[in-house]
Amino acid sequence: MTTTTDARHTRDDLVPGPPVRVAVDELAPRTNKAMGALDAASRATDLEPALCELVRARASQINGCAYCVDMHAADARAAGAPERTLHLLAVWRETPFFTARERVALELTEAITRLSEAPVGDEVFDRARAVFSEREVADLVWLIAVINTWNRLGATAHAWPLSG
């Protein structure tokens, strides 16, 4: 396969993202404020910041929330996640570049995010309990629930446009 690059094309040629459908944060400020508080509470954890951002980015990939994928990939990078890990996040099971804790957290993320496809099995929780404390497992469940809610807002309402 060959790839050619045409110097006439620049980043200025990018097509804008979808317009805001519903400004849910502005139109429902009380609920938005409560969601912000829930998000802040879910961030008050002893879990590694990079791991948390990988979890948020993976759920966002599954849910198709471009805004959240972009934001949490940048946040993961800022938290120290290796660039290679970010590039391979969608295929984490196929690579050796994730720690045991990251693998279990991503497995739990996928199971909870895809809850409509199958219940979260005891074996997933058993694997989580093998590498995380009970409190950390609880923190992960909240973290995953919160990012899934943000994803549903972002992917449905297109509430926050991507900026260049």
Image (spheres, rainbow, N blue to C red):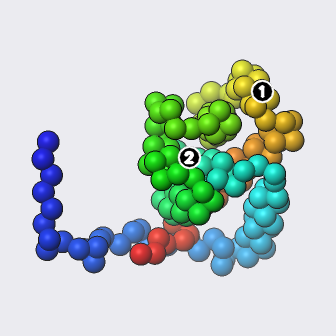
Q: Amino acid at mark 1?
A: Ala
Dot 1 and dot 2 residues touching (CB under 8 Å): no
Sequence order check, earlier mark of 1 and 2: 2
User: Which part of the image, by quadrant, shows the N terminus?
Assistant: top left
Task: Tell me the crowding category of disc 2: few under 14, some 14 to 19, or many 20 or more residues within 10 angstroms, Cα based.
Answer: many
Query: In screen coordinates, is 159 left or right of 127?
Result: left
* Residue found at x 23% / y 74%: 10
- Quadrant of the frame with the C terminus: bottom left
Circle 1 sits on which residue?
130
- Among the 4 quarters of the image, the one containing residue 130: top right
Asked if residue 149 is positioned above or below residue 159 in the image, the reply reads above
Q: Position of residue 21 (x, y in %)?
A: 50, 70
**Secondary structure under the numbered disc 1 in the rendered image:** helix
* Res 156 seen here: no
Q: Position of residue 14 (x, y in %)?
A: 29, 71
42 or 79, which lies in front? 79
- According to the picture, the residue beneath numbered tag 2 turns out to be 58
At a point 52% along the width and 51% down the height, the residue shown is: 82
Rendered residue at 54%/71% (across/down): 160
Q: Is residue 98 above or below residue 122?
A: below
Q: CA distance from mark 1 to mark 2?
A: 21 Å
Bin the neighbour count of mark 1 within 10 Å (Cα to Cα): few under 14, some 14-19, many 20 and up. Answer: few
Disc 2 marks a residue whose amino acid type is: Arg
Q: Nearer the viewer, mark 1 or mark 2?
A: 1
Residue depicted at x 30% and y 70%: 15
Side of 9 where 19 appears, left or right: right
